[in-house]
Image: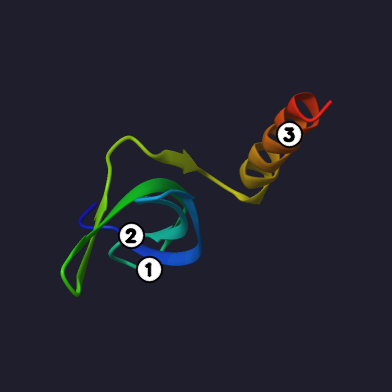
């Protein structure tokens, strides 16, 4: 299969040194494989910023999967704000 390419679609800060990143995933032959949702560690060493992706992210195959994830987050938010 070869190396995968990730094209960042969105990023949000979720903790002081953590981002969640949603990317489009493409194989070495430019075939769309789905979406990746991963956590990114961000550290600062002086003026230098280092970003490292952590293992065990979510692999979502299509738009429907992203919509289901959004629905689950929306449902959770409704439950915790009541």
Q: Position of residue 71 (x, y in %)?
A: 74, 37
The front one of 37 and 41 is 41
Helix, strand or loop under label 1: loop
Please report the residue visible at 22 percent of the width from the left and 58 percent of the height from the top: 3
- Are the two marked residues, 3 and 1, in contact with CB atoms closer than 8 angstroms? no
- Are the two marked residues, 2 and 3, in contact with CB atoms closer than 8 angstroms? no
Screen quadrant of the C terminus: top right
Could you give the CA–CA distance between mark 2 and mark 3, rounded to whole angstroms? Answer: 34 Å
Looking at marks 3 and 1 on the same chain, the residue that comes earlier in the sequence is marked by 1
* Position of residue 62 in the picture relative to residue 6 (left or right): right
Q: What residue is pinned by disc 2? A: 27
17 up-or-down from 75: above or below: below
Could you give the CA–CA distance between mark 3 and mark 1, rounded to whole angstroms? Answer: 36 Å
47 up-or-down from 31: above or below: below
- Are the two marked residues, 2 and 1, in contact with CB atoms closer than 8 angstroms? yes
Q: Position of residue 42 (x, y in %)?
A: 29, 56
Residue 77 - label: 3
């Amino acid at each position: 299969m070869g190396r995968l390419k990730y094209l960042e679609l969105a990023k949000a800060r979720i903790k002081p040194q953590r981002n969640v990143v949603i990317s489009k995933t493409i194989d070495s032959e430019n075939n769309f494989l789905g979406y990746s949702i991963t956590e990114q560690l961000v550290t600062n060493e002086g003026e230098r910023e280092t970003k490292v992706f952590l293992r065990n992210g979510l692999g979502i195959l299509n738009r429907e999967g992203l919509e289901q994830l959004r629905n689950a987050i929306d449902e959770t938010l409704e439950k915790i704000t009541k």
